[in-house]
Structures are given as structure tokens and as C-alpha cells.
Image (cartoon, helix red, strand yellow):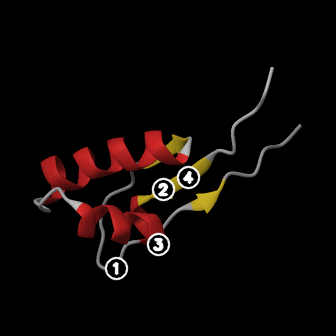
Amino acid sequence: MTESKRVVLDCRKHPNSKCSVTIAGTEAEVLEIGEYHAASKHGYAKGPELRKELQSFLKEESLVR
């Protein structure tokens, strides 16, 4: 089984955020769910600019094994 690189998007890292949501998965999964969350919960407009901003907050997930 091949492992995909997993990333994390943590809402707390966004300036002025009072949201505690953290999303983890592949980059594509996290960007899709992150874009939905940002639009539906924080009022951002969906689109390429939002995805680019979200990408800047992605961090590689560290796994404890």
C-alpha cells in the first residue's frame, strides 16, 4: 500500500482566527474541505485566491509511530 503525503490545515494559524478546526488529509482533500469551511463558516468567497491562501497555511503532518 502506497502512503500519500498528508498535510494539515489549522484554522488557529490564520491571523485573527478564533476557530479551532484542524483538517488533515492529502493536499487535494484538505484544500477542498478547507475551502468549503472557509466559505461556509467564515464568509470567504470560494475560488483560486482562497485556495492559494489556504495552501500557504498547509503543514506536513507528523506521525507518531
Is label 4 or label 3 in front?
Answer: 3
Mark 4 and mark 3 residues within 8 Å of each other at the beta carbon: no
Which numbered circle lies on residue 56? 3
Circle 2 residue: 9
Is label 1 or label 2 in front?
Answer: 2
Q: Amino acid at mark 3?
A: Ser
Q: Amino acid at mark 1?
A: Pro
Q: Residues within 10 Å of mark 1 (few under 14, many from 20)?
A: few
Which residue lies at the image location 25% right of the left edge and 70% below the top edge?
49
Quadrant (top left/top right/bottom left/bottom right) for the N terminus: top right
Quadrant (top left/top right/bottom left/bottom right) for the C terminus: top right
| SS state under label 3 | helix
User: Residue 39 location in percent, x, y?
Assistant: 16, 53
Circle 1 residue: 15
**Mark 4 → mark 3, Cα distance in angstroms:** 11 Å
Which of the two labelled residues, at mark 4 and mark 3, occupies the earlier sequence position? 4
| SS state under label 4 | strand
| SS state under label 2 | strand
Q: Classify 37 as above or below 50.
A: above
Quarter of the view holding residue 53? bottom left
**Mark 1 → mark 3, Cα distance in angstroms:** 13 Å
Circle 4 residue: 8
User: Residue 19 location in percent, x, y?
Assistant: 32, 58
**Mark 4 → mark 1, Cα distance in angstroms:** 17 Å
| SS state under label 1 | loop
Q: Residues within 10 Å of mark 4 (few under 14, many from 20)?
A: many
Is label 2 or label 3 in front?
Answer: 3
Mark 4 and mark 2 residues within 8 Å of each other at the beta carbon: yes
Which of the two labelled residues, at mark 4 and mark 1, occupies the earlier sequence position? 4
